[in-house]
Amino acid sequence: MSLFKRLEGVFFNPRPTFENVAEKPVWVDMLVLLLVALIAYSFIVAPYMQTDNSRLMKENEARLKQRFGEERYQTMIQPPTQARKIVQSLVIVPAFFVIALLIQALVLLIIGRFVSTEGNYKQVFASLVHAGGVNIFLGNAVRLILVLTKKSVMQTSTSLALLFPRLEVTSTAYVALAQVDFFQLWMFGILAYGLSAVFKVDLKKSLVVSYVFWLLKAVVNFGIGMWGISFLR
């Protein structure tokens, strides 16, 4: 199955598409496409993210100075150099994404072992890469429109937080609601077709595996988010 057919199938005909991926777990071409889209998104939103970060640090100037000291605070508020921006978008963001995918595939395989002895890591990884198209292509496209409209990254969301526009982005409630992202939910629902084909189990069991992993991922991300905003409290 060609890359275009697989990409189209993820959105419109997932069952046979993921059965094909499980049978022949190709993933390099799709991963390259995801990385190109991710890098492009990172480049475009970088100026808005920098503006958001600067505003957030200035709003919490007293706390940050008390925690880190005047000298380090002044270093923190300095705008990044062009070289740093390029490294961030071309190296750090894609590297972090690939490492996250590798770890997630391993955790999914471990969870899958509770329901089946079938399947291997390469099949799970290939399925995860293909399912990622939902979040990276469609999800980021919607997020990009929102960012360009609001001129802000932090003030935009495709999660339950979208329904509560008055919530502060540094509040516990916002961090919790932000984990329930609509495109992430769609992605892990689609991934269930791949896990069903990989582990050779029915769709109900693969949905359980997929969403148990999503829940674990949400808890971890919530913890990281709370740790991040703890510096502003």
Image (cartoon, helix red, strand yellow):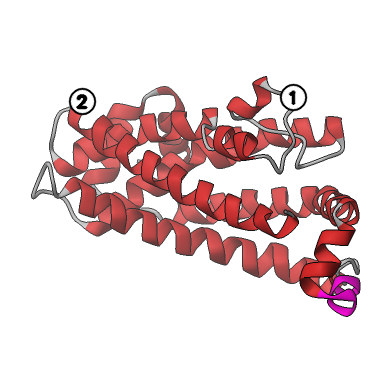
- Mark number, residue 165: 1
The answer to whether 27 appears left or right of 178 in the picture is: left
The span shown in magenta is: 69-75
Residue 186 spot, x, y in % from top left: 45, 28
Task: Locate residue 170, reporting x and y percent.
Answer: 71, 44
Is 74 part of what is drawn in magenta? yes
Q: Residue at x 59, y 62 (%)?
A: 94
Going 47% across and 43% down the picture, which residue do you hit? Answer: 132
Res. 216 image quadrant: top left
Q: Residue at x 18, y 31 (%)?
A: 205
The quarter in which the C terminus is drawn is bottom right
Q: Evaluate if marks 2 and 1 touch, with contact meaning CB atoms under 8 Å apart.
A: no
Question: Where is 233 relative to 183, above or below?
Answer: below
Q: Position of residue 86 (x, y in %)?
A: 77, 68
Q: Secondary structure at mark 2?
A: helix
Question: Which quadrant would residue 76 be assigned to in this image?
Answer: bottom right
| Foreground label between 2 and 1 | 1
The amino acid sitting under disc 1 is: Pro
Residue 51 visible in the current orientation: yes
* Majority secondary structure of magenta residues: helix
Q: Residue furthest bottom?
A: 71
The CA span between labels 2 and 1 is: 35 Å
Q: Give the answer, above or below, for where 8 lies relative to 50.
A: above
Q: Quadrant of residue 174?
A: top right
Q: Which residue is mark 2?
A: 204
Question: What amino acid is labelled 2 in the image?
Answer: Lys
Q: In the image, is residue 117 above or below residue 19?
A: below
Residue at the image position 30 percent from the left and 38 percent from the top = 212
Magenta span includes 50: no
